[in-house]
Amino acid sequence: MKIWAIFKKEMRLYFTSPVAWVVLTIFLFIAGYFFASIFSFFSQASIQSAMNPQMGRDLNVTDSVMRPLFSNISVILLLLMPLVTMRLFAEERRAGTIELLLTYPVRDGAVLAGKYLAALGLYALMIGLTVLYPLIVVYFARLEWGPVLTGYLGLLLMGATFIAVGVFASSLTENQIVAAVTTFGVLLIFWILGWSADYAGGSIGRVLQFLSILEHNDSFSKGVLDTKDLLYYVNFTALALFLTLRSLEARRWKG
Amino acid sequence: MIEVDHLTKNYGLVAAIRDVSFSVSPGQIVGFLGPNGAGKSTTMRILACFMPASSGMARVAGYDVFQQSMEVRRRIGYLPENVPLYTDMRVAPYLDFVAEVKGVGRSERRRRVADVMDRCLVADVQNRLIGKLSKGYRQRVGVAQAIVSDPEVLILDEPTIGLDPKQITEIRSLIKSLAGQHTVILSTHILPEVSMVCGAVIIINKGAIVAQGPIDTLVEQFFPTSRLEVEIAGPPSAVRDRIRAIPGVLSVQDQAPANGAARYTVEAARGRDVRAEIFQLAAQQRWDLLELKRVGMTLEEVFIRIVAGEESSESPEGVVEKSVGEPSS
């Protein structure tokens, strides 16, 4: 399988260079910090609620720890993922290795799929390692696994979209910084669209809210699986990958 | 094996190559020569299916590089000019990746990678990061990745640049050993290298083919005379006139005289060896014959004459036969 060969090569490049290690370390450090502070805040609230049973009724570990954690993680990802995807094509262009890669008997689609899946694999490893946090929670409290699972599904889908945007930006330039800034800019705009939704109001507000890239993740972490959110991420990813393929093919035509 | 027909490539308004046609028959090693910016790399990039031509047609192993690029890419090994490699990969895994992507089966891959590392003399650095290798090693890893899938056609853009003399010899003999089963087209600046490795040459200048064919044929075409250098101690004018009188001698020219003796350059019709007659003449006249030597015309002189001729717009194209190349199959 050609896709598998490309996937292995990209994974090797991530892990022989310090990129993957640095990204994993920083990500887990920040995510761990968020988890620790949210969880200790929750345990303080629990102690207080022991004296005030009225307040205790609203305390729910899934809702008060996992949901804010997922939302914080998505912000870290927004900052970090452009740095994971920026090298995928830009680096090959700068180093000229794309000249060899694209003259090997591999279809552009397979090159793209291999690279995309490699970035997705690294991403899955990143969020996979955070499963430690719900495991810690479950040791101390009763956790509803349903919303945690959908929360992870949401993170995975959202990350898949981030990566697709990043790959597209990377295919447009040979400068990694340009690729990272473009990705970050696009993702940020789709994030802050949701903010304006509140005061835009009406149907424009609803459209803006629908376009917001983080908004859709929220229902997943509540434990709601909505086709609207699923389709949003799947379509967004598919569009970005389609554009990437076009941008790779464009080179074959114009030279 | 390689057929190029009226190929033109424009970058915007600038034509990198114009109306280039040549053919390479199977098993041949062909040198692709030309000054910098003549269009060598452009032509090779088109042949390797990296970029399309603006017009014209190119076929490699019977497949069109544009229409059937996947078939062509399966059958070629390509080494681009600046040897782009993944600096963050180690040598053996890199070659394994290339072999896999080129469709070498899992069981055969290990053997082929080991074999190619031996042939290209990179086995001793197989666990090193490519980015940490010296230029010479990187160049050889580049050649290794081109031949790892045992392709029918090799397209090598400057394969010996940046190597030390010993490594150049090694790569040269490697390329030579590929003749027969592989068709090789290689570009280079180093002209003596071409005469050593290649059977035929294609010379390109300013985007157009100016000469092509077997080296001997080209030399004969451009230098229809044979040349001798003679050093004789004797009265210059008499020497000149008597040598001139030998049948077959076309011209005699003085060179700077040294300690009483004088050097002459004698041109005679090709195939006419006048050395014995010059010796007899000197003996008869009791002149001291100090040196008598045949000067071989080299590809270098052909190249310079062609390229310089182009420059002074005194077009040699009337002299050059445009398609000396063998019929291709």
Image (cartoon, coloured by chain):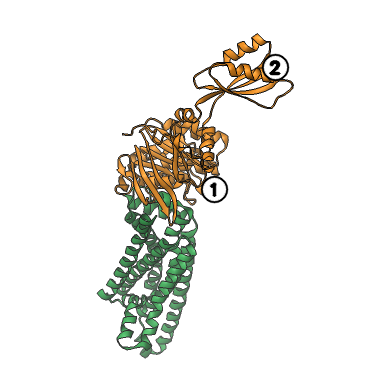
Chain colours: A green, B orange
Q: Badge 2 local density, few (<14 within 10 Å), some, or many (20+)? A: some
Coordinates of residue A47 in the picture (x, y in percent):
43, 84
- Depicted A169 relative to depicted B13: above or below: below
- Describe residue B249's horizontal placement relative to residue A114 as left or right: right
Q: A10 and B301: which one is in front?
A: B301
Most foreground residue, B133 or B178: B178
**Mark number displayed over residue B251:** none
**Which residue is at a point 27% across and 72% down the rendered structure image?**
A231
Q: Quadrant of the N terminus of chain B?
A: top left
Q: Which three-letter amino acid code belongs to the residue tagged 1?
A: Lys
Res A239 → quadrant: bottom left
Image x and y of residue B72, in percent = 33, 44
The answer to whether one can see residue A69 in this image is yes
- Left/right placement of residue A144 relative to residue B190 reads left
Q: Which residue is mark 2?
A: B234
Q: Position of residue B75 (x, y in %)?
A: 34, 41
Q: Residue at x 36, y 90 (%)?
A: A54
Q: Which mark is residue B132?
A: 1
Give the mark toward the camera: 2 or 1: 2
Q: Is residue A117 visible?
A: no
